[in-house]
Every structure is written in structure tokens, then in C-alpha cells.
Amino acid sequence: MGISIKAVVSFLLITLIIPCVRAQREGNRIQSYKGNGMYWQFKGEPVLLLGGSSDDNIFQHSSKSLDEELEKLVSYGGNYLRCTMSSRDEGNEYPFYKDEETGLYDLDRWNDLYWGKLDYFLEATKKKDIIVQIEIWATYDFYTRPWHLVDDQTPWERNPFNPENNSNYTESESGLTSIFRSNGQSLINPFFNTSLPLPQPFNFKTRPVLLGYQHKFVDKLLSVTLKYDHVLYSIDNETQADPKWSVYWAQYVRKKANEQNLHAEVTEMFDPFDPTGGAVEGAVMQSPATHFFTLRSNVNVTLNDPENFSFIEISNNNAQSGQVHYETSLYVWNKIQESGIPRPINNVKIYGADGDMWGGETREGIEKFWRNVFAGAASVRFHRPSWGLGNNQIALNQIKSMREFTNSMNFFNLKPANHFLSQREENEAYCLAGNEKEFALYFPANGNVRLNVPAGKYEARWLNIQSSEWQNSEVFQLPGNVKTPSDDQWAVIILNIE
């Protein structure tokens, strides 16, 4: 029986169309900007990621509450959210089915409500072009932090992976203990050792049982998230686990994406505050006496492994303050330049709010938001209260001003350029520049610095950051001094017009 011409034509059309559709979709996915790999592009266009939210896992919120928060964020120019796959807060859903009679979870069955919430969240953010940065393993869901107590139980004591809480394995079968007293800094839960080479802290024969269920969870997560083009992946939240764990899961996620002819953007978020390893004088760092694993598990792991980690996450650097904060951020930017492999630097958590748990200040949180961008960061997001400003009105106004400011210049062609400044006091001003024709300055407060640029006529446009209002343009000769119009926080674009 012969093959009809219609069938042949249909086959040829399919073989031609499918690769084109795949290529178009891959081109639309969030990825490093082709024109400058230090930034992101989405739907083929460069994009600066700006955000703030009321929680780290807002996919757990009601659809009404979520929709309202997304609408508000977008209305102020925001396009970036954090999504920890966390269930430790009161009222949160867990990913697994729970038998109400036994009170035990079944790790072979899913809680459709949890996954439905995640899918709704991703669909809603997709519609609004909001980039989502997912943290696969919500670190502190597996530890005993006191401020996460619910009904006198720690997160680990409530966790479905705890052998006491599921019908799938025992302590001896999984290598886990039901009672595990650690905050994740002085002792690592064996949960985070399953992918490590021998020797292990538990019997090798039991390891595949737990690892198999970890695979099931990640496979389920990816079956939902890989359908979407606006998702970034971080393996953990501020972890101190062995970096081999991070590499294992980064490779696993990328492999699963590759099987669908997709590329997944993956990073790891490590716990240490100082990403420079002491290279910047005055940088704050946790003591190895209390944080045993900071020398092993730090930003250098992602910096030195571009094959497995396609972007750098330095959120905990936002424990720094003042000019030191800028210098530590810039250190990471410079290290990437030296590597010759440009990769975006993300800050999914900006700390700093009056009365936060570290004694921080709102003013400092605002400055960190701007300093990171002037140090070359590709994303900034205000951390949830009380650690940060979240999505309160102050945060939203800052997002609006940053979007207004960066949209008014050739932002993605600019680089950190404080070398153009002199007569500058500590933390007085910061500079971005491109081709010695366009300059951007940020002043945290009243400032007066000398801008050493090629001689000529320049136009300056000042933005009052607090009010998001532009001042009238002024024309003057440079090199010379640039002085803020008042004591407020200011940003200025300076263009050579000769």
C-alpha cells in the first residue's frame, strides 16, 4: 500500500514546524542576555529583575491574596519574585497526601492542593511577565529553628520526610532520625547527604530509599515548572550542605530540562555573609566556631563552576552594610569578568528594615537595593518582613524609581565605574558608565563629587528617588563637580551632548 502525498506533506510540515516552535520557545525563555551576559533577557529582550513580596512562598497564599499582590507589584514596575518550596508556616500545604486516619503522609501520593497552588502561581506570574526564582529545597523546613515553631513543633518534626511522619520508611531504612536538633549551621541533616560519595554518615544500603523519594519530589516539581519559560532555579536557601549535594541537583535539573530540549538556569544560595572570603576589609562574616561549614560551602563554589551554575546568587551578602556592601558585591562582579564567562548576579533577598531581627534599618535596606544595581547586579528583591521591606509602600516606591531610572538610559550597556569619581567620601556616590558618553550616579544622601570624564558639554537629569519625580534637565561643562539638588536620595543620568 503506497503512502499518500497528503501524508508525506503532513510529515514534512511536522518535521519542519516542531524544531521552529522549540527554537522560538527556547529563545523566549529567561536566559543570559545575548548582548551582555551579566544581565537577563526574557522574550528576547534584556530585563532588569526588580521585586519585593510579603512572603517567601506566596504560592501558598489564597488566589485572591496572590492576585492582588501580583497586580500591585506590576503596577510599580516589579517583575521578580522568590518562591521557596516551603511548607513550614502555619496553614501551609505540604506536597504529599496525608491519611487523616493514621496522620501519616504517603510519599508515593501527591497533595493536589499544594501542586495546584504552585501551578496557579506560575500561570498568574506568566501572564504578568514576572520572573520566578524557585528554591527547590527549603533548607529550614528540615531543621529546628525556634521562630518556625507551630503547635510547639519544629519544622523538621512536622516534615513529611521525617520517618516519624510517613508510612514509606523507618529511621533505619532512610538513615534519618525523627529527632534532629540543629539549626543547619552546626550540624547538617543527613537528608542533605544522600547524593554524596561514600563514606556516608548512614548505611549506604539505605541511601537509595531516601534518594528515590527526593527524586520523585524534584521530578514532580519539574513536571510543573518546566512548562513555564519564566522560572529560575536555586537548589537551596542559604545552605551549608556539602557542595557536592548542590552540584548533584544542579546537574539533575539541567539533565531533566535537556531531555525536553530546554535549558534550565540554575544556581545555589550559600549561607556565608561574605562572598569574598575576607578579601574586602571590614566585611561581616559568621564565625566558623558556630557556622562550621562556611569555609567549605560558599559563593566560590558557584563562581568557579560555570558548567553547573549558570548564574550567581549572593543574597546573604546583603548582611553587609555601607560602602563595604558595595565593595563585596563588586568583588563578585569583578571575579566574573576575570573568568571570561559572564553570568548574571542575583539578589533574591535584600535585608534591611526598621526593627528587623538583625537590628537593621529601612534606610540601609533601600541603599542596598540601589548599591547592588550600581555594582552590576542583574536582580534585586526586597526580602519579606521583618527581615526586609517586602512589598510595603516604601519598597514599591523604590521599585518604581529604579524602573523609571534604568528605563531612561542604555542601562544594559553600562558597567560599574567608580573610577570616574574623586573628592568622594565613603558611601557618598556610586557610578555606572558606558563608552564615556553616558553616566549614571546614585547618591544615598546629600552629595558633592567630582566626575572625571572627557571634557565637554553634558546634560543631567535628576530623579528624586523617594518621590519618583524627575527634575528639569540642566546643561553644564565637565569634568567638574556634581552636586545633589537637596538632602534627599537622588539618582542622575549624565549624557555627553557634544
Image: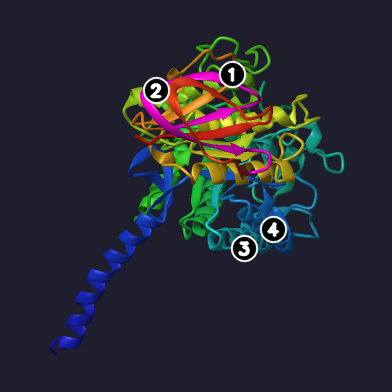
Is residue 199 shown left or right of residue 176?
A: left
Whether pointer 4 and pointer 2 mark residues with C-beta atoms closer than 8 Å, the reply is no
Find numbered disc 2 in the image and state the secondary structure of the residue it sits on: strand
Mark 4 or mark 3: which comes first in sequence? Answer: 4
Mark 4 or mark 2: which comes first in sequence? Answer: 4
Frontmost residue, 439 versus 3: 439
- Residue depicted at x 56% and y 60%: 128
Q: Main secondary structure of the magenta part?
A: strand
Whether pointer 4 and pointer 3 mark residues with C-beta atoms closer than 8 Å, the reply is yes
Query: What residue sits right under mark 3 in the picture?
Result: 120
What is the magenta range?
A: 439-468
- Residue depicted at x 68% and y 62%: 113
- Residue depicted at x 67% and y 44%: 397
Residue 133 in sight in this render:
yes
- Measuring from the top left, give residue 352's x and y in whole percent: 70, 30
- Measuring from the top left, give residue 249's x and y in whole percent: 48, 40
Query: What residue sits right under mark 4 in the picture?
Result: 66
Q: Is residue 359 above or below residue 208?
A: above
Residue type for callout 3: Tyr
- Measuring from the top left, give residue 104's x and y in whole percent: 74, 53
Residue type for callout 1: Gln
Q: CA distance from mark 4 to mark 3?
A: 10 Å
Q: Residue 465 falls in which quadrant of the image?
A: top right
Coloration mode: rainbow
Query: What residue sits right under mark 1 in the picture?
Result: 323
Q: Residue furthest top?
A: 281
Q: Residue 173 falls in which quadrant of the image?
A: top right
Mark 2 or mark 3: which comes first in sequence? Answer: 3
